[in-house]
Each structure stands twice: as C-alpha cells, then as structure tokens.
Image (tube, rainbow, N blue to C red):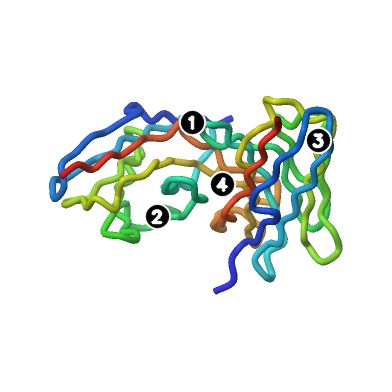
Amino acid sequence: AQSVTQLDSQVPVFEEAPVELRCNYSSSVSVYLFWYVQYPNQGLQLLLKYLSGSTLVKGINGFEAEFNKSQTSFHLRKPSVHISDTAEYFCAVLPVLLTGGGNKLTFGTGTQLKVEL
Amino acid sequence: AAGVIQSPRHLIKEKRETATLKCYPIPRHDTVYWYQQGPGQDPQFLISFYEKMQSDKGSIPDRFSAQQFSDYHSELNMSSLELGDSALYFCASSSGGSGNTIYFGEGSWLTVV
C-alpha cells in the first residue's frame, strides 16, 4: 500500500516570492510521482510527473519538482509565484507494476497555495 | 487534444433517488478510474476498469455500481442517495500498463438534497 503526506495544508505567500510545497510518500514498491493542481471549482490538471531519469522534473506554469529517493520526497517548487497560481495542489503516487491495469493513484490531502499581493 | 469527458457536469438529486454519471475516456485509453472528492478533501479512489473488466476496487459503497462498455466509456450508478454522497466525482483514464499518466476529467458535481 502507498501513502502520501503533504505536511502543509495551507501555504500563504506573496506574489513574486518563491514557494515550496512539500510531499513525502511511503510505499513498499517503487512508485511514479505526480503533482496535480485544482483551481477553484475545477478538475484536476497534471502539473508534472516523475517516471524515471533525471530527478529534477519541470512542469507547466514554471513549476518544477525534485525526486529524492533516499528521503522519499517529491517537493514542488516555483521561483516566483503569481496570483493565478492560487489553487489546491495534490501530490500523488502510482505504484510501478509489471502488468497492465489495476493501478490507481493515491493522493495526499492537498496543499492550498494562496498567493497574496 | 481530446480530454476525458464527463456528463453531466452538475446534478441535483433528492435523498433516496438514483443518479448515473457518464465518462468518456481519452481515445485509445483502455483504463478508466472513478474518484470521489468530498468538500475540502482529497480524491478517494472508488473503482477502476481495464479493458472493460473491473481491475481494482476502493472505498465504493455497495449502493454504487459501475461498468465499462464496449466503446470504453464508463458509467457510475448511484442508488439510494444519501446527503453524504454530495461530492465531486472524477473520472480519469490512462492507456493501461504501469507508468502511463492518468488524466482527469473536469468532474461531475453531485448535490444530494
């Protein structure tokens, strides 16, 4: 079984400041890692993903995340946030399995990023 | 690019009524997932289908059922609705196999009154 911990339920930050949203996971098998963003009253949009290769992945809207296997973390960062980044951010893991089907994403509890002027 | 299509987007039902949500996955995606997101909560996995067969089951109430049809679209049927069923229901799809990205629809808002 997998679990995802997002330590910060809310992160207030001023516009143009940097931000880091933390995500730690636990799993008995290897996992793929994802960050999704949910704007108010909207669906889940994929921000970025780590499947393999370079541990630093870049996503849409200037976000990036770094996979740290030893610390089982996948923190999301942006060097300069904008008002439009205000949203709920979910970290999620997907177990690496050999057979097709049967996989499911496990989500963290989400972090509300609030960007203020 | 085509995305996951869900209908209806909004639905209001009374207690004890029945509701059906539909999901049309991205073309050539063979796996469909259903998630439930309560107010202020993270999405909870309900059920998934791979090649029209149920592949995994999560915290789906017995009052709920789902299936995937020959054209790969899926329907989530919810009966004897309760106030606590009010939530955003997401459908997601992927092309099967491990490591393929799961794409979500915009969700269907169900309000039970």
Left or right of residue B64, residue B86 in this image:
left
Task: Give whichever of B77, B60 is nearer the camera.
Answer: B77
Circle nearer the viewer, 2 or 3: 3
Instruction: In the rendered view, tell whether residue A20 sits above or below residue B85.
Output: below
Query: On the image, numbered disc 4 is attached to which residue?
Result: A96
Locate the C terminus of chain B and report the quarter of the image it occupies: top right
> What is the x, y in percent for residue A24?
38, 32
Tell me the tag on residue B40. 1
Q: Amino acid at mark 3?
A: Phe
Q: Amino acid at mark 1?
A: Gly
**Mark 1 or 3, nearer chain start:** 1
Q: Amino acid at mark 2?
A: Leu
Label 1 neighbour load within 10 Å: few <14, some 14-19, many 20+: few
> What is the x, y in percent for residue A13?
19, 38
Given contact means CB atoms under 8 Å apart, are the residues at marks 1 and 4 in contact?
A: no
Q: CA distance from mark 2 to mark 1?
A: 20 Å
Tell me the tag on residue A47. 2
Instruction: In the rendered view, tell whether residue B82 sits above or below residue A102.
Output: above
> What is the x, y in percent for residue A10?
31, 30
Q: Secondary structure at mark 4?
A: loop
